[in-house]
């Protein structure tokens, strides 16, 4: 296999893994799989691109401003589109439609505000998108950094789940009512998770923008590939999401180089269907031991 | 016995509660005083667990008033009630089975600002009461035996040093020797000044250790009084064997010490 | 669910208006074009409503199934000169077939997987249309699709319109028939209370599949007409926006209501005319509407209408209640239950340890024991809800181990749950009729077409269900939605549901819990009557009075092992039993036996 294809598969896969992790952050305490997640990624990329490329803001300031803004949008989504639905029924799936509606609102609003043209985003200082020739693969210093940053981010997120707040999130995921009886407020954790999940999505968008450009078309694409990585890697499992992200990224790159770029989505779709058919709970998960 | 005039720690007055269209509790009044063990007995479906759920804020009463430690908690949220010092160990333990014993114990103090030292002291206290848990700290809670799980559930609640602990069927599925251990732990907690509201199927054992008792039937309290009096009265038999009888009190309410 | 809100007169008026329209507008007028298109959209929306509203599976990629129908017709008629009708059938079959292939893994998983997979399917399909230029002509699309023809006569705009009106009416009636049949009841059961679906022998996966096949096939039919009406089929016709449009139509009209999709589509077609100036804001408005409707009107315009109607004209109390008289039920051939060496462990807890239980056919056996002794676990193992670690469960001499819950139910095992699991949105009568799921012979086609055989069966089962409601003594509640019925009566309805399933072995999980004295007496008489008919009954119960009166044999469980077994009088006087169960005091007091 061409090492170049592999390298680019890993780069794309890192981004998919990050989207999947952002899904998981939100999913754990709420059992909601946010259909607007792709648009939050896109929004992060667009806001950041505007702040740096157009407004000329320093990289770090723009980074922080973007995360906070998108985090707040996630919080608003939770308050308006998710919490009322969950209050009506903890097990219903009305949120599928309301989060989808949120995604429509965000994507069309952004489309009208920014227009369809992609915005070029430069990587932060010291890094560039210039190709380096390492091991006969043409990969840029930014892309190498992206792979490493992804690894670090997944480790940090896992680390956060080892704190008491993180354990409380896992407790809510396992038994919401039992958590209530231990003084844990699932509502507050849900709000926090929406804020952080949205901020994480925005960060993914920022990291993706030098590679993919910032444009409104980022949303649906990353939504589906992020879902693919999350489902294949078992929903809620961040390490699984990382590996599954690589699998999806490399499969897509190989599929595109062997067939044609137009087949990328189809190849991923078939991989996801095959995995779900054989292992419905994903490659890295086990079904719950006891349901009653 | 001379009556000591003091407001009860927990007081539920004329509580109605249920699920959806179904009304389970009708006009239930229950008091728990400082440092006492109060047992609720009655058949399955009598409304005992529903009462505990209403007290801990999981099922908001449709009418009536609940006060705890001088505060009205009728409409308080579950975490607020826990913070006030009223802890509820639900039926079936409801542990976080996938997390370790140590994590489960740590989750017991969620939201409390404790110094490392204080945290350590409380964990040590738990280990003292339930030595077996010390050996299992790193195992998933789901791998414990039923008795160990019950101890862990009580341990979780103890991390908050509650004023009142509500236990829903702690003896559920336990061997007699383990039941003894759990009951001993309950007595030890009372000795430390913790009030206990106990729902228990092992009526005989529960009445032995309890100070006060309430008998429930079809969502109502049909008898209440000192545990010893209830044990001697016939309301208990009626409640369990289903003999048709009108509500009757084995002892007038004011005889409670 | 069955209460008609839109009176027959209004339904006929709507149909008459639809049929009269061409008389007032020109054959090539825009109005007729729009009306034809409306009909096409309604066909697809009716299907989506069946899937999303009744079966609870939200498809976010319905445009793709419409596209499959449209491309099938376009390519087969233009390139291969097939007649329209044959091509439309191919389109319908392809839409259903490809859809099932893609959605198959999702039926085992949470509902939202299905939403994601249909969304992805639509996206992939859209790309593939462009990619397979050799087949689909890419962006240029397939042009000059010929109109349908019959007997050498080519359909102009008016005949096409009439054809589509006819197909819409047929689709509406077919879907209505399905919704009011055992399939419709199973859809709602799977959507709302999956354990209840299993208990009556309806497989959730197959049920979802049936709903999806009908839905995708209708989308394929809509697509076929789409192709001939527009005469041009391009990839741009079937974007994600188009899928959202269908979803919004259904949500707007009212998810899970028969008239919802029609009302939704009608209103929808008026809106763009009113908002012509806001065309570029369209998707933003769609999103806002979807969100607003789900939050404030989850049952859409129809739901709001229904509420207003009910306030104006309160439902008249059940008319058929008094009509049916108490009837004796024919005897039941009970099934024996034989359990040997059953073991089950949950984590570190041994819930059941080598339990034996033998219940002869036609007897009533009770399982008693303290809470947590494994009684419900035993019931769940016997009825296939759990898989045991070891042991054997024989039901009427056939090994049941390894069969799923719905298979065991189909074999004649009925059960009730500790908390009654009725479908809150269905009437008591529908809940009982749901019980007959596996007994009904009429297939999907016969049901949809309401063939005489299916009609007769439905009539018979309805009478039978009323009979069972009468049998358990709650016939006066037949037309009340189960969610509004008191707890005690819900239990009785659940027993009626189990009997309706032709259960020959009935497992009752704490039927007396939470019953009042008078309800208890009714329950006791009921159990004895059922047993008298010959059915085998296994009852898990704490109420020893009840057990002593109804059971001929008692097994006492304690911490997962059998402590004692035998006649109630003997068992209840066993010292060990009383100690385990109630403590020493019970020994002194004695037990009525």
Image (cartoon, helix red, strand yellow):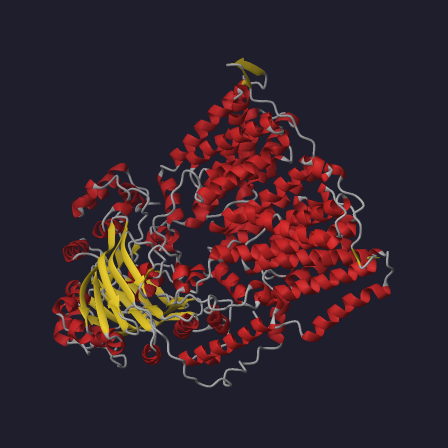
Task: Measuring from the top left, give residue B220's x and y in whole percent.
Answer: 31, 73
Question: In this rendering, would C508 be left or right of C311?
Answer: left
Give the mark count. 0
Quick check: B191 left or right of C300? Answer: left
Residue at horizontal 38 percent and vertical 33 percent from the top: A159
Image quadrant occupied by the C terminus of chain A: bottom left
Q: Residue at x 69, y 45 (%)?
A: C238
> Is residue C501 or residue C150 the one in the foreground?
C150
Q: Is C532 left, or right, of A24 in this rendering?
A: left
Q: Quadrant of residue B135?
A: top left
Q: Residue B20 in the image: x percent, y percent?
A: 44, 66
Give the quadrant of residue C378.
Answer: bottom left
At x 27%, y 66%, the residue is: B31
Q: Horizontal and vertical percent for residue C533?
A: 35, 79
Is residue A244 in sight in this rendering? yes
Does C476 sit above or below residue C64?
below
In this view, B147 is above or below B59:
above
Residue C289 x, y percent position in the rendering: 65, 53
B163 sits left or right of A83 in the view: left
Q: Is residue B4 visible?
A: no
Q: Looking at the rendering, which quadrant does residue B99 occupy?
A: top left
Up-down relation of residue B182 to residue C573 (above or below): above
């Amino acid at each position: 296999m061409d090492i170049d294809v592999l390298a680019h598969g890993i780069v794309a896969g890192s981004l998919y893994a990050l989207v999947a992790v952002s899904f998981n952050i939100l999913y754990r305490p709420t059992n909601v799989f946010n259909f607007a997640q792709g648009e939050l990624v896109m929004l992060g990329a667009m806001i950041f691109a505007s702040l740096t490329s157009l407004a000329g803001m320093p990289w770090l300031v723009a980074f922080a401003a973007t995360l906070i803004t998108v985090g707040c949008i996630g919080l608003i989504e939770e308050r308006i589109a998710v919490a009322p639905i969950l209050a009506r029924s903890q097990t219903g799936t009305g949120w599928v439609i309301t989060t989808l509606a949120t995604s429509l609102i965000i994507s069309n609003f952004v489309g009208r505000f920014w227009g369809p043209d992609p915005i070029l985003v430069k990587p932060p200082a010291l890094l560039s998108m210039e190709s380096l020739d390492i091991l006969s693969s043409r990969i840029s210093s930014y892309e190498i950094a992206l792979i490493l940053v992804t690894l670090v981010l997944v480790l940090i997120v896992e680390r956060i789940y080892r704190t008491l707040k993180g354990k409380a999130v896992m407790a809510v995921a396992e038994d919401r009512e039992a958590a209530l009886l231990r003084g844990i407020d699932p509502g507050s954790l849900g709000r926090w998770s929406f804020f952080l999940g949205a901020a994480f999505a925005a960060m993914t968008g920022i990291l993706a923008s030098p590679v993919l450009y910032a444009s409104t078309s980022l949303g649906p694409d990353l939504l589906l590939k992020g879902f693919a990585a999350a489902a294949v890697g078992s929903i809620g499992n961040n390490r699984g999401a990382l590996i599954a992200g690589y699998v999806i990224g490399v499969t897509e790159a190989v599929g595109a180089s062997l067939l044609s770029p137009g087949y990328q989505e189809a190849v991923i779709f078939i991989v996801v269907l095959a995995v779900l058919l054989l292992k419905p709970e994903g490659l890295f998960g086990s079904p719950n031991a006891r349901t009653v | 016995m001379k009556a000591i005039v003091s407001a009860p720690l927990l007081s539920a007055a004329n509580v109605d509660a249920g699920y959806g269209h179904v009304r389970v509790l009708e006009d239930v009044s229950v008091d728990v005083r400082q440092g006492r063990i109060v047992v609720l007995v009655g058949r399955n479906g009598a409304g005992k667990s529903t009462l505990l759920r209403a007290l801990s804020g999981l099922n908001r009463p449709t009418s009536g008033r609940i006060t705890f430690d001088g505060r009205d908690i009728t409409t308080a949220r579950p975490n607020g009630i826990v913070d006030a010092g009223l802890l509820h160990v639900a039926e079936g333990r409801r542990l976080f089975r996938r997390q370790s014993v140590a994590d489960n114990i740590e989750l017991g103090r969620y939201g409390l600002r404790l110094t490392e030292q204080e945290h350590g002291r409380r964990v040590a206290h738990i280990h003292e009461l339930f030595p077996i848990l010390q050996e299992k700290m790193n195992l998933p809670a789901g791998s414990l035996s039923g008795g160990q799980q019950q101890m862990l559930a009580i341990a979780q609640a103890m991390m908050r040093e509650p004023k009142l602990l509500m236990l829903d069927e702690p003896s559920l599925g336990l061997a007699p020797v383990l039941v003894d251990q759990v009951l001993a732990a309950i007595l030890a907690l009372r000795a430390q000044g913790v009030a206990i509201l106990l729902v228990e199927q092992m009526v005989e054992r529960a009445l032995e250790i309890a100070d006060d008792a309430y008998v429930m039937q079809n969502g109502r309290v049909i008898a209440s009084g000192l545990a010893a009096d209830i044990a001697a009265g016939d309301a208990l038999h009626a409640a369990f064997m289903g003999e048709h009888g009108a509500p009757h009190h084995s002892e007038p309410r004011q005889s409670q010490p | 669910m069955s209460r008609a809100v839109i009176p027959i007169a209004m339904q006929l008026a709507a149909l008459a208006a639809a049929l009269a329209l061409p008389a007032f507008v020109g054959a090539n007028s825009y109005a007729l074009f729009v009306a034809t298109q409306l009909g096409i959209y309604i066909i697809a929306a009716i299907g989506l409503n069946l899937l999303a509203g009744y079966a609870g599976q939200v498809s976010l990629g319905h445009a793709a199934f419409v596209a499959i129908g449209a491309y099938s017709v376009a390519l087969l008629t233009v390139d291969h000169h097939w007649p329209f009708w044959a091509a439309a059938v191919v389109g319908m079959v392809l839409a259903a077939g490809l859809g099932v292939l893609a959605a198959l893994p999702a039926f085992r998983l949470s509902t939202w997987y299905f939403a994601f997979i249909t969304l992805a399917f639509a996206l992939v399909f859209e790309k593939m249309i462009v990619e397979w230029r050799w087949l689909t002509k890419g962006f240029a699309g397939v042009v000059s699709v010929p109109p349908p023809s019959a007997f050498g006569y080519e359909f102009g705009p008016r005949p096409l319109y009439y054809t589509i009106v006819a197909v819409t009416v047929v689709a509406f009636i077919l879907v209505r028939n399905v919704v009011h049949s055992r399939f419709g009841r199973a859809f709602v059961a799977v959507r709302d209370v999956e354990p209840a679906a299993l208990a009556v022998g309806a497989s959730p996966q197959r049920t979802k599949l049936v709903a999806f096949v009908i839905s995708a096939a209708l989308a394929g039919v809509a697509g076929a007409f789409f192709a001939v009406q527009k005469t041009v089929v391009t990839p741009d016709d079937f974007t994600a926006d188009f899928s959202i449009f269908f979803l919004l139509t259904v949500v707007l009209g009212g998810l899970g209501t028969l008239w919802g999709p029609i009302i939704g589509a009608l209103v929808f077609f008026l809106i763009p005319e009113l908002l012509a100036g806001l065309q570029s804001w369209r998707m933003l408005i769609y999103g806002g509407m979807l969100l607003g409707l789900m939050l404030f009107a989850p049952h859409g315009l129809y739901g709001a209408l229904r509420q207003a109607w009910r306030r104006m004209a309160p439902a008249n109390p059940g008319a058929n209640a008094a009509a049916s008289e108490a009837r004796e039920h024919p005897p039941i051939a009970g099934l024996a239950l034989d359990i040997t060496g059953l073991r089950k462990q949950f984590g570190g807890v041994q819930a059941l340890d080598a339990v034996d239980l033998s219940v002869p056919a036609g007897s009533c056996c009770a399982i008693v024991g303290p809470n947590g002794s494994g009684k419900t676990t035993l019931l769940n193992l016997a009825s296939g809800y759990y898989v045991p670690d070891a042991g054997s469960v024989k039901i009427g001499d056939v090994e049941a181990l390894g069969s799923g819950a719905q298979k065991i139910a189909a074999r004649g095992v009925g059960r009730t749950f500790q908390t009654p699991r009725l479908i809150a949105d269905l009437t008591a009568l529908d809940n009982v009729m749901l019980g007959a799921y596996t007994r009904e012979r009429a297939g999907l086609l016969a049901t949809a077409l309401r063939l005489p055989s299916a009609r007769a069966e439905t009539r018979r089962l309805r009478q039978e269900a009323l009979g069972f409601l009468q049998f358990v003594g709650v016939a006066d509640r037949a037309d009340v939605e189960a969610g509004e019925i008191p707890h005690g009566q819900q239990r009785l309805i659940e027993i009626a549901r189990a009997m309706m399933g032709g259960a020959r072995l009935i497992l009752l999980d704490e039927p007396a819990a939470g019953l009042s004295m008078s309800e208890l007496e009714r329950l006791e008489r009921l159990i004895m009557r059922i047993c008298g008919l010959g059915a085998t009954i296994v009852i898990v119960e704490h109420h020893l009075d009840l057990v002593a009166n109804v059971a001929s044999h008692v097994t006492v469980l304690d911490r997962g092992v059998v402590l004692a077994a035998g006649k109630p009088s003997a068992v209840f006087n066993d010292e060990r039993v009383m100690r385990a169960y109630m403590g020493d005091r019970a020994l002194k007091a004695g037990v009525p036996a």
